Image (spheres, rainbow, N blue to C red):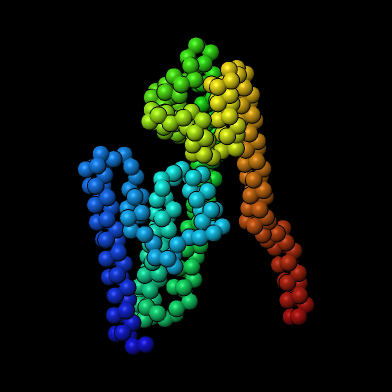
Amino acid sequence: MPPLTALLLFALAAGSLVLVVLGLRMLDADARLRQRIDGQAGRSVTSAALRFPLPRIFVVRGRDREEIEQKLRKAGYFEPGALEAFAWLRLAATGVVALASMLTCLVVNGNPLSPLFPTLALSGLTYIGAKYALRMRAASRERILTAEFPFLLDLMLMMLESGVSLDQCFRGIAREERVAVPNHARLVAMLVEDLDRGQDYQLAFDRWAARVAVTGSRELATVFRQSLFHGMELVPALREFVREFSQRRVARAREAIGTITVRMVILMLVFFMPALFIVLAGPPVAAILDTLGSVKG
């Protein structure tokens, strides 16, 4: 391919990407304006993704769709258009990496498509790696929420033992405890908003457990429902949950310590042992080489 034609194709691809980004920004601004006019300014900007759907070839389907939706919920993205927004961001990242690779080839070789393999490989790795980045984000959020759970339950225990009802306990945490448990306070605030909109307690607790998406959250939501509708005593059950989450936190700390120990052993084998072998075996090997040299001489 002539360099001029390749350069023209690269310029067209870059211009198309710029136009797509500008169009998405205009759609986002239009969505924000419509939300303000309709009095729905609290909704997320992911509605712009719903107004501008993906081409059918890029729509996530089947088991991959279920896995991404689950990871998005665990990562803290509950909006209806979260899946579409993730797909758009993944495509945009892939396009940016492809253009950067083509630009590098143009600067180095004078042809943005020569060689073609690095561009295809980097684009594919970016497209696949987006899911792994989402998985890491979900795992990080799960660790944070699990670590905060004992403090949240301790706050609830103190409020309940002082005579506060469960509903007032939720409202107090959502309003006044954003410093102690910032992540859980946000989720509890969303639970309070669901209750203020007239949602049933059972459905609101189910939605809260789905948003938390941590092992034990659904059981805790069941305990809340039984306490409200069947009169079950809540304080002893919460103490058991505090003990369970504290033990889980200690287990995670021990697991992290074990992982660090393995990493340190690997680092010692890689960096320390070669230097040790050189120090110990260097003088004898040098003496043997000197002796052989003197014998030959």
State left or right for residue 121 relative to residue 51: right
Where residue 48 appears, as percent x and y from the top left, is 32, 53
Rendered location of residue 27, percent (x, y): 27, 55
In the depicted structure, whether residue 32 falls above or below residue 57: above
Tell me if I can see residue 136 in this picture: no
Total marks in image: 0
Residue at the spot 52% in from the left edge and 16% down from the top edge: 160
Please state the horizontal and vertical placement of residue 17, each as a whole percent of the image. 31, 67
Which image quarter holds the C terminus? bottom right
> To which quarter of the image does residue 251 belong?
top right
Tell me if I can see residue 196 in this picture. Answer: yes
**Residue sticking out furthest to the top:** 163
Q: Of residues 104 and 164, which is closer to you in this image?
A: 164
Which of the two residues, 258 or 70, is positioned nearer the viewer here? 70
Q: Is residue 287 left or right of residue 81?
A: right
Toward the viewer: 89 or 211? 211
Percent x, y of residue 189:
41, 30
| Residue at 44%, 19% in the rendered image | 168
Tell me: 12 left or right of 297: left
